[in-house]
Image (cartoon, rainbow, N blue to C red):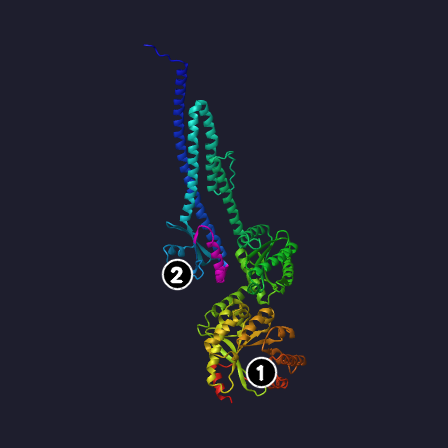
Amino acid sequence: MRKMRFGLQARAIAVMGVSLLIAAIMVILWMARLGAFQTEVRTLGGELIGSLYEQEAQRRGISFAGDLALALVNPMYYSDSEQVAKLVNALEAQPLVSYVRVFDARGNLVHDGSETVADFGRRMDDPLADKALAATQMLLQRTEHVLEVTMPVLLGEQRLGGVRIGIDLDGVRAQQAAAGERLDSGIEAVGRRHLITGLVLLVTLLLLTVVVSLYVQRTLVQPVRSLVTAARRMEQGDYEVELPDAGSNDEIGELVRSFSTMSQAIARHDREVRKLAYTDALTGLSNRLAFRQALESRMVSASAAGQRLALLFVDVDDFKRVNDTLGHEAGDDVLLRFVERINAAVTSHGGSQSLLARFGGDEFVILLGEGDTAANALRLAEVLVAELSKPLSLSGRDVFLGSSIGITLFPDDAADATGLLKNGDIAMYQAKLAGKNCYRYYSRAMDHAVERRVHMEQELRGAWERGELHLVYQPIYRTRDRRLVGVEVLLRWQHPQLGAIPPSVFIQVAEQSGLIEQLGPKVLRAACMEARRWEAVAGGEQLFVSVNVSPRQLRNGDLSDVVVACLAESGLPASRLHIELTETAVIGDEMLAASLLDKLHRHGVKVWLDDFGTGFSGLSHLRQVPVDGVKIDKSFVADMQRDPDDLALTTAIIAMCHALGITVVAEGIEQEAQFDLLAQRSCDLVQGYWLGRPLSSTQLVQLLKTSP
């Protein structure tokens, strides 16, 4: 038998076989380690992603709830349902926000983001409601699908209510699962790539094994470790993560770039959220939250240095009229132009350390803390009143607004930010009471005045339903035959504890608080119903009824609809209803007044201009605004006998109105001599205590029965 030779080729093959076997074993061992490493990375990455998304969801909920609770303080304190709805709807549009519920101090629902708020005023009774309503501080509750954050709405130590924000945990889990899937996909792709690398290692033996090991270390281990390190930094809130360029276009490089892009997006979103939280979106000024933080910091510094600060609370007068008549876009344009004027004034007179912020709507706050702050505040207020009262050209017309400014000083008036802001608001309100377009300094007496006004407003709410408000009727006589032809409707308030409250007091409160918009239609309806009942006893000539309408009702734009509804419900003929508008209300916006009065005329309702002569009006106003009659103010009638100028002016008004075909009514007739002077000058109608005092409906019926 021939002996087999174990030659070089065989040895080479054997060596190669052994080498391949060794390489295979090494590859197998390496692949096993790689698999374990991938599992570790997948587990660690999944845990980090889960923790990151969970904490981010919780952070968002707490941030949203805190911001909304702060933003709702003023709207809930002043019962501004429109602003509450705007804030709730804006937050509900945020991603992952499942629901937003705002409740008052009694646990009743104020707003839930829906258009109708079907459960408005009802106590919330869902499974999480009890703990939420009882919470006096931030509260986290969790169900399988929702993470709920409850935050109380506080005004100082007063709890106005709270907000409940639900974060959609299903959405968070979906995002978490998607991120996990992307991570798993990247890791699996890397595993497949290195399986191929392992097969190559079988051919390249030990040397290539070393090379490939180094390659794996550079292309896989280091990037993944960088990702883990970056994820941990992001978990701690550091979103500004810079990852080294992987230098490849494979799955690992794509994973690194994707992670880098994701971190940049999160960082950008975080900056945007912070900007939204501290910046007013329309004007770019600091908002309430940012100003409050800056004010508290400046107050600490000023207190330590023994310095004073001055705060100016600026409110644009009659801004709502711009939105109502020209639209919100025009209103935004007006605000931006006002900001330009305020900025220019603050830059010129406020000093380099001044701070300007918008508190929402038409309210601006200015903080001064340089030099003689009291003198600087006075000079700046004077400049602002002058600059902001200048006309604005808008849509081809000049708009006159003006501003009311409240000034308060630290530490003279308050020792904390809350008190200082409250005092500025009170002083601004006193400027509005003083006639607007002016400034007022805060004083301790203002607190009592505001308390009295708030108490009066609270008592006035519901006074009609409680039967405390009632109507009386001032007789109006025809001059030529002294015949009773109509009545003016007057509103009286008989308070059970305070007694009779003068109309000059409570009507002003109703106007300023907006309650007049609720009382006006009720008065109009009651007057029409009463006038309809008089027809059976009025005899030949039916009385007309004259009802006063406030400027607020005129600006709302729905006056004609309210009048038509009252006439239809009562059955009163339109010719027997007269609407009285003050002269100053009509002059405030003649185009709007002319449009509304034209609608009333088309329905057959007559319009009278009350207090004629007190608003410095002239013939041009009577020509532009279609009125049927004017009422000469009683201040002219009272001095006709003693003051030749008043007599001449009254005579001129009567002649001017008759030339235009307008009826003239004189009010405040208290003497026979006044009546005779007006009769000689052909004044059409008169009213006053000499002719008859205001009567109840029953007294008026008795007068009608006895009248010829």
Disc 2 packing (10 Å; few <14; some 14–19; many ≥20): some
| Image quarter (top left, top right, bottom left or bottom right) of the N terminus | top left
Q: Residue at x 52, y 67 (%)?
A: 513
User: In the displayed structure, would residue 572 be above or below residue 147?
Assistant: below
User: In the displayed structure, would residue 397 be above or below residue 474?
Assistant: above
Instruction: Please name the predominant secondary structure of the magenta segment in the image.
Output: helix
Q: Which residue, given by chain and number where applicable, does mark 2 sit on?
A: 123
Whether the residues at callouts 1 and 2 have beta carbons within 8 Å, the answer is: no
Q: Can you tell which mark lies on residue 418?
A: none
Q: 7 or 511, which lies in front?
A: 7
- Mark 2 lies on a secondary structure that is loop
Place of residue 342 in the rendered image (x, y in percent of width and height, measured from the top left): 62, 57
Tell me the CA gap for discs 1 and 2.
55 Å
Can residue 690 be seen here? no
Q: 643 or 83, which lies in front?
A: 83
Q: Is residue 139 left or right of residue 288?
A: left
Q: Is residue 5 left or right of residue 255?
A: left
Is residue 87 inside the magenta stretch? yes
User: In the displayed structure, would residue 26 be above or below residue 441?
Assistant: above
Q: Can you tell which mark lies on residue 686?
A: 1
Q: Callout 1, which amino acid?
A: Val
Place of residue 86 in the rendered image (x, y in percent of width and height, measured from the top left): 49, 58
Q: 148 or 295, which lies in front?
A: 148
- Magenta region, residue range: 74-98
Looking at marks 1 and 2 on the same chain, the residue that comes earlier in the sequence is marked by 2
Is residue 571 inside the magenta stretch? no
Q: Callout 2, which amino acid?
A: Arg
